């Protein structure tokens, strides 16, 4: 594993799972350094997933290799200069929402047009483990969730795993999908849940939503309605489609509880209780 000197890098942003850096003299390099307690096997899996996505033709920044500063482990990536997330673009240029929604639908449809390859994980196995590891729900609740998970239609569709408008970026007129740590295969409806979950959260915590995603919940709702129309047809019944996605949303919210180590906010807990309570 290559050793790096963090003094050669400029901190760009930090989150709960790690920090991103840009190289001070090489503008083509980006570094994602994980938290000190991160499992190296999990980091290696993220890198493997990024390489699988790249090799399958997903339009994403080219992944590099594992590196360390001697204490923490990270991943080197190609840096996409001048990028802006679709979330920020929705807020900064609302007149572009129809264009952005169309591009988002195209990018997701292209991703879902790919099929699993050797070494890729089944999303049901990933979510099943997360459900079992959930500390906030009892065994009976989790068993009902597992029954639902394994009753949903099976597919070998490539999935992003955390698909929302913060994970597609625009630079130089070209769109890229980023953050493919959860790249897997399974029912594509799972990829159509995160945007809805984000907006459910934003409805009750609009200030936090706008701070994190740089747009209002009303702008996000407009964007999402157009995404559904451009994906499933202009005459799609949006309300009916949202109902179809509810069991997938319920599973994802239970998984999110595990990943973030805290229960979902009470206002949207009903989505889960409807299925597992």
Image (cartoon, grey):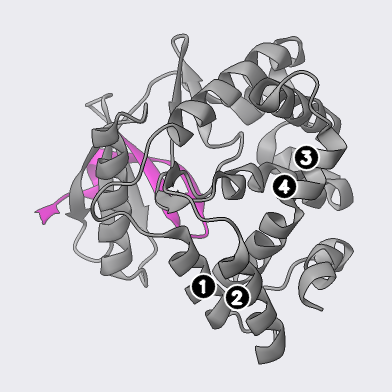
Q: Is residue 200 left or right of residue 122?
A: right
Give the image location of residue 206, x and y in percent. Answer: 84, 44
- What is the magenta segment's predominant secondary structure? strand
Mark 2 element type: helix
- Residue stretch in magenta: 1-22
Q: Is residue 246 left or right of residue 261?
A: right
N-term-proximal mark, 1 vs 3: 1
Label 3 belongs to which residue?
241
Give the image location of residue 138, x and y in percent. Answer: 69, 89
- Which residue is at a point 44% across and 10% down the rendered structure image? 172
Spatial CA distance of label 4 from label 3 is 17 Å
Decide whether residue 267 is among the magenta residues: no
Q: Which mark is residue 146?
A: 2
Depth order, front residue of 185/267: 185
- Mark 4 vs mark 2: in front: 2
Depth order, front residue of 57/187: 187
Label 4 belongs to which residue?
198
User: Disc 1, disc 2: CB below 8 Å?
Assistant: yes
N-term-proximal mark, 3 vs 2: 2
- Mark 4 vs mark 3: in front: 3
Whether residue 208 can be seen here: no
N-term-proximal mark, 4 vs 2: 2
Q: Is residue 27 above or below residue 144?
A: above
Mark 3 element type: helix
Spatial CA distance of label 1 from label 2 is 6 Å
Instruction: Write down the quadrant of residue 9 in the picture.
Output: top left
Q: Which mark is residue 128?
A: 1
User: Disc 4, disc 2: CB below 8 Å?
Assistant: no
Quadrant location of the N terminus? bottom left
């Amino acid at each position: 594993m290559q050793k790096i000197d963090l003094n050669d890098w400029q901190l760009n942003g930090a989150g709960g799972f790690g920090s991103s850096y840009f190289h001070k003299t090489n503008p083509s390099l980006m570094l994602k350094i994980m938290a000190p307690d991160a499992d190296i096997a999990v980091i290696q899996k993220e890198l493997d997933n990024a390489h699988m996505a790249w090799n399958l033709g997903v339009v994403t920044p080219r992944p590099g290799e594992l590196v360390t500063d001697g204490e923490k482990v990270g991943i080197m990536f190609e840096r996409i200069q001048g990028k802006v997330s679709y979330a920020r673009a929705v807020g900064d240029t609302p007149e572009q929402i129809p264009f952005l929604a169309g591009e988002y639908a195209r990018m997701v449809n292209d991703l879902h047009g790919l099929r699993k390859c050797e070494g890729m994980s089944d999303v049901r196995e990933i979510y099943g483990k997360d459900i079992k590891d959930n500390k906030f729900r009892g065994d009976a609740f989790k068993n009902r969730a597992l029954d639902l998970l394994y009753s949903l239609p099976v597919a070998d569709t490539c999935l992003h795993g955390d698909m929302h408008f913060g994970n597609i970026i625009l630079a130089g007129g070209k769109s890229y999908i980023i953050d493919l740590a959860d790249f897997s295969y399974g029912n594509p409806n799972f990829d159509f849940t995160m945007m809805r979950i984000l907006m459910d959260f934003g409805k009750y915590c609009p200030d936090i939503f706008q701070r994190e995603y740089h747009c209002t919940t009303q702008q996000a709702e407009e964007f999402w309605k157009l995404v559904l129309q451009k994906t499933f047809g202009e005459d799609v019944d949006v309300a009916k489609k949202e109902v179809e996605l509810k069991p997938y949303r319920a599973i994802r919210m239970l998984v999110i509880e595990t990943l973030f180590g805290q229960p979902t906010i009470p206002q949207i807990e009903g989505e889960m209780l409807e299925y597992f309570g």
